[in-house]
Amino acid sequence: MTSAETPESEITGTAEETSDAGVRRMGATYAFGRMVVAPLGRLVYRPRVEGRHHVPKQGPVIFASNHLSFIDSIAIPVAAPRPVHFLAKASYFDGPGMKGWFSKQFFLSIGAIPVNRGAGQAALDALDQQRQLLDQGSAVALYPEGTRSLDGRLYKGRTGVAFLALQTGAPVVPVGLLGTDRVMPVGAKRPSLRERVTVRFGEPLDLAHHGPASSGRARRGATDDIMTAIQKLSEQESAGVYNELPAHGTIEKIKQALPHERV
């Protein structure tokens, strides 16, 4: 599962430091991003934003979105009516030299939190970071598909988002992103200024009726509801399968072929 975001209820001038494995509030850098980078992004890219009134103004909330482009994690914080953070690859924060410093400051300014991506324990650690943010009353953004869709279809959702929602009681706001793959296709070095993005926020989903987070059936049912809501907003064709990277080695191929829960 890749990344998402978390905001605080509103930007303040304070910062809460975090350990390497913990959650950080972005302090001055993030405040700068909300005051300068986000308005600049709206001015330059002129996103069409629909359904902002559906987003709860306070309290924990999970934005669950389709994933088409690198700039999805910029489009959501720019369009959202409240601060949003998301998890981003740790390599964006630890590059060498001046270029590495600018990369770190940019990602901090748009609400990114570094995380080591991967399956197994890395995925569980990422979920724990997001749970901490929700416990603080923040908002997080996640991509249930796990990785970008390269063919424009909407892939089957992984259950991590539903697990967080059922565990914390946070409502899920489905998000449909349209056009981000045209603004910045996979492999492009810079976004196009000729295309526009549409960001659609749907009505919050209360998934509690599915059952406890400990139930695999509840997690799967809640995930399917989330993906149905995303598809209505994004108008994508359903792929009906998981979006998985090619397995390397016989053992990995067997593990991928066997039925198991994708988080």
Image (cartoon, rainbow, N blue to C red):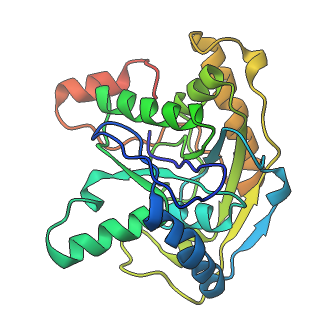
Report the front residue among 38 and 156: 38
Instruction: Name the residue rendered at 51%, 85% in the picture.
Output: 192
Asked whether residue 208 appears in the rendered view, the answer is yes
Q: Is residue 226 above or below residue 219?
A: below
Image spot of residue 141 (x, y percent): 57, 48
Q: Quadrant of the N terminus?
A: top left
Counting the numbered discs, the total is 0
Report the front residue among 193 and 83: 83
Decide if residue 206 is on the left or right side of residue 41.
Answer: right
Q: Is residue 125 above or below residue 14?
A: above
Instruction: Name the residue rendered at 40%, 41% in the picture.
Output: 244
Query: Farthest bottom residue?
Result: 194
Rendered image quadrant of residue 117 = top left
Q: Is residue 31 above or below residue 256?
A: below
Image spot of residue 166 (x, y percent): 65, 22
Q: Is residue 24 above or below residue 195?
A: above
Asked whether residue 195 appears in the rendered view, the answer is no
Image spot of residue 56 (x, y percent): 78, 46
Decide if residue 247 is on the left or right side of residue 216.
Answer: left
Instruction: Name the residue rendered at 85%, 56% in the picture.
Output: 53
Report the front residue among 49 and 261: 49
Rendered image quadrant of residue 92 = bottom left
Image spot of residue 146 (x, y percent): 46, 43
Report the front residue among 236 and 59: 59
